Image: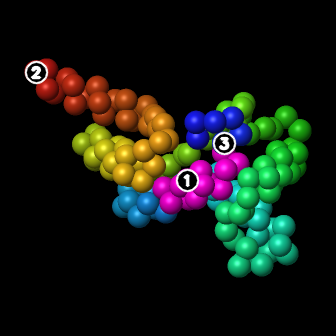
Amino acid sequence: SGEKQGINNPEFLHKLEAFTEFAYQQPEVIHVDTLSTVMKRLNRNMHADDPDWYVIPDNRELAAQYLLLYEMSLPQGLDLTNQIDIDKSSVRLNLTLQSMSSNQMIDLENRLHDWFAKNAPELKVDLASANLMFAHVGERNIKSS
């Protein structure tokens, strides 16, 4: 997000949600684990499970309170450090993907980077996985042959 506590900013959460929707449109994507979905679920839960409230909270303070409530409700020993950094300036999204070739993996990576470049250029994005790393290693080996 570029700022401390920036993940509570509704503008950031809306961009996260827009990316989530884009990711689900990709044929390789099976599931997206993201903070925006958690925030929408908490907002709905805090409004008697009314489906009309399955939306991003509309102000930063409310989003921060929901996040604190969520953190406090986790079982002892669990926390959100696998999804959120310590100063709450960045999040991790996990995409569950179908099996695919190295070329398909690199193509998906390019589409994801393109989306951020066009729709959220102010956000810093790092894509990482063992499969993606090996896709690039294989591509470099082929080009160097």
Quadrant where the N terminus sits is top right
Q: Quadrant of residue 78?
A: top right
Q: Amino acid at mark 1?
A: Leu
Q: Amino acid at mark 3?
A: Gly
- Secondary structure state at the residue bearing disc 1: helix
Residue at label 3?
6
Which of the two discs, 2 and 3, labels the residue nearer the N terminus?
3
Residue at label 2?
145
Q: Amino acid at mark 2?
A: Ser
Which of the two discs, 1 and 2, labels the residue nearer the N terminus?
1
Name the side, left or right, on which 55 lies relative to 145. right
> What is the magenta range?
7-20
Residue in front for this viewpoint, 2 or 38: 2
Image location (x, y in percent) of residue 142: 16, 27
Q: Quick check: is 13 in the magenta stretch?
A: yes
- The residue drawn where x is 42% and y is 44% is 121
Residue in front for this viewpoint, 103 or 40: 40
Dot 1 crowding, Cα within 10 Å, few <14, some 14–19, many 20+? many
- The residue drawn where x is 67% and y is 63% is 56
Assign the magenta stretch its main secondary structure: helix
Residue at label 1?
16
Image location (x, y in percent) of residue 64: 78, 49
Residue in front for this viewpoint, 128 or 112: 112
Q: Quick check: is 101 in the magenta stretch?
A: no
Name the side, left or right, on which 97 lies relative to 9. left
Name the side, left or right, on which 42 lies relative to 85. right
Residue 125 visible in the current orientation: yes
Colour convention: rainbow
Residue 30 visible in the current orientation: no
